[in-house]
Structures are given as C-alpha cells and as structure tokens.
Image: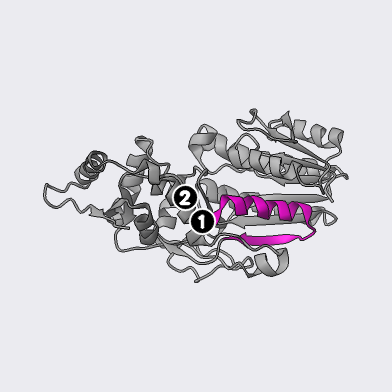
Amino acid sequence: MARVALVTGVSRDLGSRFARLLAADPSVDRVLGVDVVPPRHDLGGAEFVRVDLRSPVVSRVIAREGVDTVVHLNVIATPQHAGGRATMKEINVIGTMQLLAACQRLPSVSKVVVKSSTSVYGASPADPAMFTEDMEPRSLPHSGFAKDAVEVEGYVRGFARRRPDVLVTTLRFANVIGPRVRTPMTRYFALPVVPTVLGFDARMQFVHEDDLLEALRLATVGQTAGTFNIAGDGVLMVSQAIRRMGRPTAPVPAFAVATFGQMFRAARLADFTPEQLTFLTYGRGVDTTRMREELGFKPTHTTASAFETFAEAHEQGLLSAERIRDAEDGVAEFLGVRDGGSGVRQSHG
C-alpha cells in the first residue's frame, strides 16, 4: 500500500487527472503532485509542491515528506511545450536522472512507476508484426522524444539493478487518444488536409486516456514489477483513421516528407519530428499479453473505439468547404502541382 505517493508532471492535464485519481484511492494515504509550474487543473485531494526535477530539491522533498511511492510522468513528448528541444531533453533526461538519484539514496522509497512509450521500439520496414517487451528495436530512435524515452528507460533499469529492494514498473503506452488529449498525433488527424506518405499505410495502436490513467493507478497500488506494453486491442491503419475523421488526404512522396514536416512545423499546424514521420511511414504494433496476464489490466477501449471517441469529439468542429479548399490549394502549391491535378484526395467516412 502506498502511504505517501509523489507524482511528477502534474502541470499537464493527464498528470493532474492522475494525481486527482490517485488521491481518491482509499489505498493511498497522501499524494504530492510536483512540477516546475503550478497545475492548470484541480488536483482534488492531492497537494502541489513546486519542484524542478533538474535540481536536487526533489531529494529534500522526498526525504521530508517520507515518500515511499514515486510515479514519474514528467517525460515530455513535444519540444514546443517544453520551450525547445534542448529544454525538452534536459527535463526528460536530466530530470529523470536527478529523480532516480534521489530515490536511490533514500530508503523510504519502495516503489517507482515510470510512464514510458512504445516509441522506444522505433519504426522501420524490418520490424516484427508485434513487439514484445523483451524485443530490441530493429532501428534505434536517433532523435526527439523517442530517443529520450530510450535513455530514460536505460536509467530506470540501472536504478532497478542498484536498488533491487525497490519494486520498479515501466509502462510503455501506445499513442494516447481521447476527447481531451492534445498531442502531435491528435493534431495530425485534426489537420484540415491530412498528409500521408505515398505508397504506405502505417499500422497504429491507441490507448484511451481513461485507460492510461487506470493502468497507471493499477501499477501504483499493485505489487507487479516489470515492463509492460499498454495498448487497446486491434490496430487501425492510417487511412482508416483519416476516413473516420472525414478529412481529405494529401499523399506526399517519401522523399518530400521531411520537407513537408518542416513546413507544417513552421506554420505551427503540427509538430512533426523525424521519428513521428518515420512512424507515420512504417507504423508499429506491440503485443499486450503480458499486460493482461501479469499486470492484470484489460483496457475498456479497443484501439478503434478509443480513436472513435476522439473523432466524435471533433464532429462539432467539421471544416467548412472554404477552409478545406484553402488547405488543398496550399498543399497543391507546395507540391508544385498545377490546377486540375492537385493530388489531394477526399476521404469519405
């Protein structure tokens, strides 16, 4: 049982919602939510403590409050939210190092739960149909959030070896989606015209935001250690997801994808990073047998139904014909296509 739990990353929506959920759990006595800035949302029964994980102050907080359970959610996926790639890496990697160093020194800590990502598997044409937790990536991520997640997991494994008395649980989540989630992937599918990689139709898995919170809660209050893939049943192809959104598509040749991503980043339409573009080309699938059999978690949403909740939340914001035409014209101009052959297809749902 967690007496005093510390949750990092509570300034963002999912972090604050998890702190609130955990504080309402009768098996948890007290919850401290920490972040460098105050949360935008109510923490319920959780207490907020202003802490920058990159500083040694976190060690004093853990010691002073007698924290026995640490839930690390503060691994940021988007450079724009962090204030740039350099700051993002500092928060993700240096912040994790400082947090784990504090946990290693303090005997009160008996459990550490880390929110990770299936992006650690990378994406390549040589990938297996489904990655299990014991498989190595065929192509290691070389940049961005995925690279940070690989480094974070490396530090977590090192910590587990040095503190074998601590129960360590790492949850690798597929792309999180739902009515309230705002990520690079949700912004991608909400674009007025959705670019796709010509000749490819990537497989995708999703986990609903509510299932993410419940999986974290179960790992926090339970006694199961190890690494677990977390995803809803089934897969969606990129083309199927776009049809469900009712958006037109703009197939882009593979050689132009990187330039296209730069254009969207410059226009602040979507934060396309190289690893995201690779993922949208090749996709990824993960096996969730261990999630069910060892962790004992069964998502309430499949991949398809999780995406459906996101699509339904955007039905009220359907695009006007004029906005779609403007977006199509911009894409066609970028691709250098003359009138009459824009190459932009309308997806019908």
Numbered range of the magenta stretch = 206-231
Query: The residue under label 2 is which amino acid type?
Result: Phe
Tell me the distance, in whole angstroms, between the alpha carbons under discs 2 and 1: 7 Å
Decide if residue 54 is on the left or right side of residue 308.
Answer: right
Q: Which image quarter: residue 292? A: bottom right
Instruction: Say which residue label 1 marks.
Output: 306
Q: Quadrant of residue 211?
A: bottom right
Residue indicated by mark 2: 310
Q: Is residue 230 magenta?
A: yes
Q: Residue 322, can we see it?
A: yes
> Residue at left 76%, top 50%?
112
Residue 250: x and y in percent read 27, 52
Identity of the amino acid at label 1? Answer: Ala
Asked if marks 2 and 1 touch (Cβ < 8 Å), the reply is: yes
Q: Is residue 205 visible?
A: no
On the image, the x and y values in percent for residue 223 come to 80, 59
Q: In which quadrant will I find the C terminus?
A: bottom left
Is residue 340 one of those drawn in magenta?
no
